[in-house]
Amino acid sequence: MNSRELIESGTLELFVFGKLTEEENKNVIDMAKKHPEVQEEIIAIENAVINLSQSVSPHLSASNYEKIRQRILARKDVITMNKKSSWSSYVGWAAAAIFVIGFGFQYFKLNESQTAIDKLSNEKSSMQKSIVNLEFEKQEAETVLAVVRDNNNIQVALGGQTVAPTSYAKAYYNRETKEVYIDASGLPTPPEGKVYQVWGLKLEPLTPKSIGLLENFTANNTKLFKVDKAEDAEAFGITLEPAGGSESPTLEQLYTLGKV
């Protein structure tokens, strides 16, 4: 045990009060000789005990004590008792002081431990959230790669239209399973109260059929959306519609269009 560990252990308080074994006392004395900081701590503890004892112990001058004594002895049937040494009262107050000091030290250590536990708990919680987020990102990336690399998927380029000429999107259409994925990374964030709606089109005669909404647009980091299956679609279009979608496309808000 080094000097700092000895000082923080509470052993020096027990040494001052005489509660250590002979061997423990010898160890403390040896440490005090080798380490001035240990000796200074012992002196500080002794001073603290004495100051506390003096500050709370009752004070009675010698003259007042003698006057009270004579008045009591003047009464009959009073048993005279020898004056007790004040050492016992000092011992009592010193014991209380040692208890307060020891309790305070343990309370400090408890708070210090609790703070460390709370810190570790917060760090663990943050790490768990980071792991969950990384897992979601990994799954999203794997989904994107699976769609792009699937040889059965036809990539259909959807070019920008009059209302948004710089917009673009891609449709990944599987002719066998009829599944459709939309890459909407080239579309601007829709205004509040609006949503993008995807249409599967047959050209002759022109027959649009809604195959889904691109909801939670901002929250989707990859901007890859799976929509409903499209039976024998010949083209795909995306319009901007009121929240909840429309029964038929608003052609004035046709953002992208592409032929299979």
Image (spheres, grey):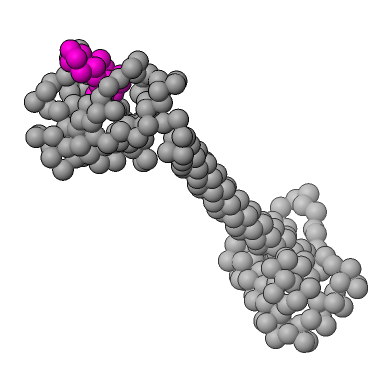
Q: Any magenta on residue 200?
A: yes
Q: Classify residue 101 as left or right of residue 220.
A: right
Number of callouts in the render? 0
Q: Classify residue 50 as left or right of residue 166.
A: right
The image quadrant of residue 166 is top left
Q: Residue drawn at (11%, 23%), measured in percent from left and top?
A: 251
Q: Any magenta on residue 221?
A: no
Q: Residue drawn at (73%, 66%), measured in percent from left and top?
A: 9
**Picture coordinates of residue 146 (x, y %)?**
48, 37
- Compared with residue 238, is residue 128 higher up or lower down, i.e. above or below? below
Magenta span: helix, strand or loop, mainly? strand
Would residue 85 be visible to someone looking at this image? no
Q: Residue drawn at (19%, 40%), measured in percent from left and top?
A: 167
- Compared with residue 210, is residue 116 higher up or lower down, i.e. above or below? below
**Picture coordinates of residue 40 (x, y %)?**
67, 81
Which residue of the protein is positioned furthest toward the front in this rendering? 204
Q: Closest to the observer: 217 or 6? A: 217
**Picture coordinates of residue 222 (x, y %)?**
37, 40
Quarter of the image that includes the N terminus: bottom right
Q: Residue drawn at (17%, 32%), measured in percent from left and top?
A: 255
Q: Which residues are magenta?
A: 194-213
Q: Classify residue 31 as left or right of residue 61.
A: right
**Picture coordinates of residue 73 (x, y %)?**
73, 58
Would residue 79 be visible to someone looking at this image? yes
Quarter of the image that includes the C terminus: top left
